[in-house]
Amino acid sequence: DGGITQSPKYLFRKEGQNVTLSCEQNLNHDAMYWYRQDPGQGLRLIYYSQIVNDFQKGDIAEGYSVSREKKESFPLTVTSAQKNPTAFYLCASSGSNTEAFFGQGTRLTVV
Amino acid sequence: RKEVEQDPGPFNVPEGATVAFNCTYSNSASQSFFWYRQDCRKEPKLLMSVYSSGNEDGRFTAQLNRASQYISLLIRDSKLSDSATYLCVVNPMDSSYKLIFGSGTRLLVRP
């Protein structure tokens, strides 16, 4: 089945640790995105990538890093510099001028 | 001014009611518009694309008003299962893959 897969579904991070969230798609989409959603809030763009080996910062990129070494993969690292990382993280992909498809999300909690 | 703005609601309506949401966008060059539905603690899913001529899918009708820079979503004969958050999404066309999400409008349909 074609789709977009995020893992893990739940993730716990100790303060000061870096963690990496996985996002893989087999839709042959050029663009991939990472969004953050806090309870009762809308989606905020962290990073997006239009092509392999290229990505741009979104509105809240501080404390996050990404890579796009393969078209299918767009992992997000939440670094220790992100002071309030507890949130719901959503990865999406889209073709040119088309709608985005989302993964099921990763809930990250700092313990 | 936000690039995409929505009334956060909640809209609390009885079953069978007709309800309408509006969404305004700031970039007049925007070309692609979508409505997504997000259930609590789930990923957003595409509800419908919005075309210049307007489009209808069963009980749902989407319209675009370029002159006033807003899109609308009309839901007729509301069902309990329509309770969700509805997200307006715009492609501003300053970067062909960057989708801008509104914060969402919450709908509660009561028995």
Image (spheres, rainbow, N blue to C red):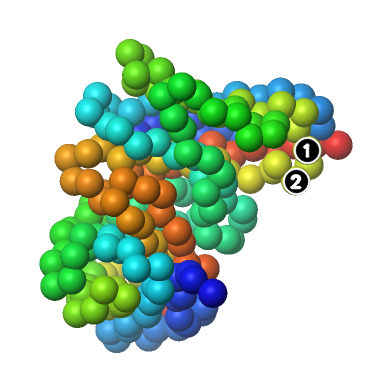
Labelled disc at residue B110:
none
* Quadrant of the image occupied by residue A30: bottom left
- At x 46%, y 49%, the residue is A41
Q: Give the side of residue B56 with respect to residue A101, left or right.
A: right
Q: Give the side of residue A45 with respect to residue A107, left or right.
A: left
* Quadrant of the image occupied by residue A63: bottom left
Return the residue nearer the eye: A49 or A111.
Answer: A49
Q: Are marks 1 and 2 in contact (CB under 8 Å)?
A: yes
Q: Give the side of residue A33 with respect to residue B111, left or right.
A: left
Mark 1 vs mark 2: tell me if same chain.
Answer: yes
A4 vs B57: above or below: below
Residue A79 shows up from this direction: no
Labelled disc at residue B79:
1
**Image quadrant where one finds the C terminus of chain A:** bottom left
Q: Disc 2 designates what residue? A: B81
- Where residue B44 appears, as percent x and y from the top left, is 52, 54
Name the chain letter of the residue that bears numbered label 2.
B
- Where residue A25 appears, as percent x and y from the top left, is 39, 73
Tag 1: residue type?
Lys
Asked which secondary structure carries label 1, the reply is loop
- At x 61%, y 55%, the residue is B40
Asked which secondary structure carries label 2, the reply is helix
B80 vs A84: above or below: above
Return the residue nearer the eye: B88 or A60.
Answer: B88
Name the chain letter of the residue that bears numbered label 1.
B
